[in-house]
Amino acid sequence: MTSALKTSRWGGPDGPSARWLLLTSIWLVFVLLPNGVTTWLGFAFIGFAMLRPVWIAASVAYFVATVMIETTEALGAWSVVLGGVLWVVGIAHGIAANRTWQTTLWSRMERGLSPLGRGRPSRSRRTASRRSGRDVPDEAVGLLDAAGTDGSDYLAETPSGGRTSASGRSSRASRGRTPAPNTRQKALPTTPVDVNTATQKALQALPGFTRQRAKAVLAERERLGGFSSVEQFSAVASLQPHELTRLLPVLECSPRPRRARSFGRRVDL
């Protein structure tokens, strides 16, 4: 009976049940309807439920494609072929999106966050955080909600039931001893650091950045023509969630510099 329970749940006995998986996949009904005429409705549902621009944009694209295929008489028999292609593409896209949709939902539920919207802390979690005397920043909540990240790695329980940082955990372990001053720990800069204009020296001054790390980030920034967001900068720099959480208050991202237009090689006649 134990083995049957394990197989009926996704990811082991502590994962979501088969019933939960079925209920959260109900939006795929719109995707599976013939000719893909309602695929856009399914992506609109999960897009606005999660406020995820990628899925909302997909919904608009499927809607426009459906309208064009169904209303353009000049296509003739090709409308059936194109409708079939749109249907197959929508099904493949829907299956891939459903995995992300379910993973995000379950991850938020396990952490006591609101399953819909942007995954803000639920009312009960905010109340408990206020009682503990320490609020978790919104930026940290979003990072700790990411798939594969366990908040307990960065937040520990306090005696009053609240949360404290990992550094607080180590300070309690060393209570009664005078810790040696940590001269290696860098302080946050007092002025914002723009990831698209910062020099190597400015990046090296950030906590967690070495000379090699700063040079690698600058080389990738030059190749990309600038970063589109702080998150892209974080991915290029391979920042861990706790590192990005600490740096977020001082990081900013200005628009990418425009590259000079090229009109081809000039030929003298």
Image (cartoon, rainbow, N blue to C red):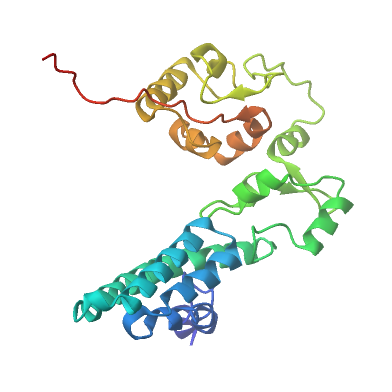
| Picture quadrant where residue 7 is located | bottom left
Task: Give the percent coordinates (x, y) of residue 229.
Answer: 52, 37
Task: Give the percent coordinates (x, y) of residue 103.
Answer: 51, 65
Task: Give the percent coordinates (x, y) of residue 198.
Answer: 54, 18
Residue 246 shown left or right of residue 126 in the figure: left
Q: Does 268 appear above or below 69?
A: above
List the single residue furthest toward the left.
269
Q: Judge by depth and name the residue closer to the eye, 17 or 115.
A: 115
Task: Give the percent coordinates (x, y) of residue 111.
Answer: 66, 60
Q: Which residue is drawn at 56% across and 29% down?
A: 254
The C terminus - image quarter: top left
Q: Does 153 appear above or below 177?
A: below
Q: Residue at x 47, y 20 (%)?
A: 214
Q: Which residue is drawn at 46% across and 34% down?
A: 238
Residue 101 shown left or right of residue 182 in the figure: left
> Can residue 247 be seen in this snapshot?
yes
